[in-house]
Image: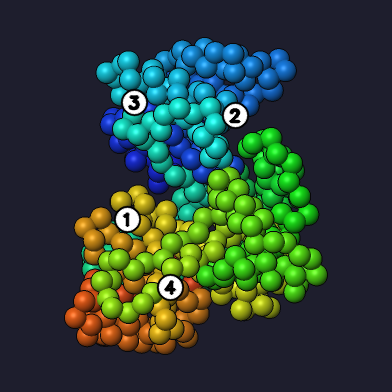
Amino acid sequence: MVRQNYLPRIVDSKLVEYLKVFGAVCIEGPKWCGKTWTASFHSNSQVFIGDPSGNFQIRRLAEMSPSLVLEGEPPRLIDEWQEVPPIWDAVRYKVDTSPDKGLFILTGSATPNHKGILHSGAGRIGKLRMHTMSLFESGDSSGNVSLEELCRGKLKPMLTGDVALGHLTRLIVRGGWPGVIHLPAEQASLVAKEYLRAIVDDDVFRMDGIRRNSTKMLLLLHSLARNESTTTSNKTLKNDIKDTDNEDIDVVTVAEYLDIFERLFLTDNIPPFSTSVRSSVRVKQSVKRHFCDPSIACSLLNLTPTMLVNDLETLDLLFEALCERDLKIYAESFGGNLYHYQDYKNREIDAIVEMPDGQWCAFEIKLGANQIDAAAQSLLTIKKEIEDDPKGKPPSILCVLCGMSNAAYQRPDGVFVVPITALKN
């Protein structure tokens, strides 16, 4: 790898920290999100299990004796280790027999089943999740506002510049794939199409050697795209396929395919938030549906930037997906977690960042500046109801994350307003 051409990633600092703590670090995430490039930047030797040279000689050697691919200057990168699952136990054993840290960096774009893996690696192999690029990493956010500082109630008011609607739609369609961030959205969107083709035609089979119905798999993917950024149930997905595509699929198959998509890091759902609210209000326990990148949904729905401008309802949902992708990346960098809130009183909070100390911050996501007032009022109403509940624990800050605002500031009612194009970790 040519290190001088490396684009820094937010996960870099955490990887450096983990290499000081663990004998090995495993970087997981979707294909083509930059795992190999990042791991190579931090390694001193590499082996690529998927290298087709010599009729996949490296993989065949690893299958015969996994220890053969472990020799090299540390940290040693072992790319796509999951193609030969016994490598995991070989690395774990090597780490156990050495007092040194940072011996190996493993990368994987799929979570294999446990066949062939005898030990979890807990305490020996640290795991890091990598995502496609956030707007700050791709150079599309100024980074003038730190999410971590914001969640602690610190924000310096500033003008951030106007953002055109067409620019936001191009960012959504283009996605955060490192290899295409400098290409026009129409060309960059081809990556998402090829990504999906590779998943359905190849990666699903390579996980466990089982052939599945690719037609039904694509139908489910299209349904997920139509239900992006919603809390749609598995049963509703099944019904959506029947109503929209005039095809049927049973709920068991839906659950099986959703598990596969998750193991391939194709989906990246947001879990519900409830425990830290400590409220008597019953909360819904549905995940919010997301692909690993909003460009995937655009590809499945054949959306262009121009089409998105003319379909504001879909644009709102995909803009929400873009913002929540970035919030998750930024929050994970400082030990935070991302959730959503939805209760049986029909109250919702688009995104919640839970801090390492247990404090939580509430975010409403709105595309236009004309929606800020209503979003702020919604947040204030929910906060007051939680404060009035004896068991409630209110959010520490409230924020409207906006697409087309030209300033970052705090309103007189205490609600922060921040453009997504000014945010960083």
| Mark in front: 2 vs 3 | 2
The one nearer the camera, 239 or 152, is: 239
Question: Residue 23, labelled with which disc?
Answer: 3
Which is more N-terminal, label 1 or label 3? 3
Question: CA separation, marks 2 and 3?
Answer: 21 Å
Q: Is residue 89 left or right of residue 146?
A: right
Quadrant of image for the C terminus:
bottom left
Residue 314 in sight: yes
Question: 194 or 290: which is nearer to us?
Answer: 290
Q: Earlier in the sequence, mark 2 or mark 3?
A: 3
Residue annotated with mark 1: 336
For the point 75% across and 74% down, the residue is 243
- Nearest to the eye among marks 4 and 1: give it: 4
Q: Secondary structure at mark 4?
A: loop
**Of the residues shown, which amino acid type is indicated by label 4?**
Lys
Kindly identify which residue carries mark 2. 83
Work out how far the residue at label 4 is from the one at label 2, CA to CA, in angstroms: 38 Å
Task: Identify residue type, mark 1.
Answer: Gly
Residue 404 seen anywhere in this rendered image of the structure: no
Q: Earlier in the sequence, mark 3 or mark 4?
A: 3
Q: Residues within 10 Å of mark 2 (few under 14, many from 20)?
A: some
